[in-house]
Image (cartoon, grey):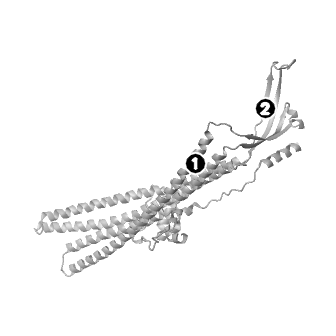
Amino acid sequence: MKKFLTLAILLMTIFTPVYAKTSDEHPEEIQYLNLDWWKRFNDETLINNLLTVYQNNYDLKNAELKVKENEKLVKMQFASELPQAGVAADLNRDLRGARQQFGSLIIPAYSQYNYYIPLTVGYEIDIWGKNHLKTKSVKEQLEIIKQAKRATYISLTSDFASDYFNLIKADKLLELQDQLVLAQEKIVEMVTAKYEIGLCSVNELLNEEKFLTSLKEERNQHKLTRDVLQESLKVYLANSDNEIVREKYENVVLLENIPQQYGTNIIENRPDFKQEEANIRRIGFDVKVAKREFLPKFIILGQIGLNAYHLDSLFNSASQFFNAGILPSMDIFSGGRKMAFWKLKKFEYEEAANNYQKTILDSIKEINSGLLEYKTALQNYNESTERLNTQAKIYELAKDKNQIGASGDIEVLYAKEAYLISEKEEVSNKINSVIATIGLYKSAGGVDLYKLEEQL
């Protein structure tokens, strides 16, 4: 029995290769939120909402599950580099008729039990490194999935933040629109009074009433925009019941002094660029595997176990058996399958290289477009701010003239409406600048824009 155990241990020792220990440590997913960047907007409500998105959003949960699935695929492939061992016991009873004959010797009819308990171990000697290359290929596929997960985080958080600030804009525009409607209603009342005493024409009254109607229609549109944005944000938060908590427009921070010139290596931060890099490496490993398919395989096979015809002699030394050997194998003809598979992988590699170059061009285009949109939005905001300041002076002048009797109340209301319209434009341009900043952050690969110059 000691000999049996010694042989089993020796067999497993020989067949077990030395390999590096894999690590199951993963970075915290919350780092993909890049909260340090979002904190620059000085909006604690936004941060809390993003943390809720991280906890509840189903797209993020599925992205994490995809990574876990592919981690198991890596472990499954790595198992092919290890020896395989198993026990397949067999108990059967032979019933033989008197049909067997060896020359003049005739075997009479008989029956007997057969107890067969083998431990079978097999291991493909990876002398060409083919199985290890397959494992590397699957690891690169895992890297692609991880970058897809990172892209999901960048896209979801950026889209959520954009809708969040658009909701703040809708709140403010609705507030200003209410003031516009109220001012126009007063104007209509005044013009109606003038018309009744014959101081203005019916066309003037109808024009003011028509303008009031258009303002109310615009208010309805702002309400619709606000409600649609609220429902959209509830989907991100996976919460269809509670009201969306958000900051007031007056507390919105417009980031300043963002670098407006970047080197071409900025694209190295983007998940799609890293995916294409990993894809080229993955297919490169696949090409090498396909080429090694032409080489012979060498498999070590071994068995150790017990074989007896009587249960009481199953553990006797005579019932113990052991065999081992190397089985070389090589396909002589496979109908061109291996050659076709090798060329297929080479074509895939060329396609991946083309996609890599295209991704570089698309990335540069998106970053440049995002930078132009940011610059234009910032210029529009600055110009609308100047226009608002000018209109504020005109409004104050109208009120001063009204106080000294140099103009009527209706002139003050007209000046107020012009001021409110200018303020609406300033609000839109400010939020558009914030959203353009978020778009630039997204196109740059979800990296803090203030830290890009440190990395380049």
Q: What amino acid is labelled 1 in the image? A: Lys
Residue 246 visible in the snapshot? no
- Identify residue for label 1: 346
Q: Tell me: 186 left or right of 81.
A: left
How far is disc 1 from disc 2 in space, using C-alphas? 51 Å
- Identify residue for label 2: 91
Question: Percent position (x, y) of residue 110?
Answer: 84, 22
Q: What amino acid is labelled 2 in the image? A: Leu
Residue 429 visible in the snapshot? yes
SS under mark 1: helix
Q: Nearer the viewer, residue 74 or 288?
A: 288
- Report the quarter where the C terminus lies: bottom right
- Location of residue 192 (image quadrant): bottom left
Crowdedness near tag 1: few (<14), some (14–19) or many (≥20) residues, C-alpha within 10 Å: some
Question: Percent position (x, y) of residue 455?
Answer: 55, 69
Residue at 68% x, 48% y is 131
Task: Point out the tag, 1 or 2, that comes first from the N-terminus.
Answer: 2
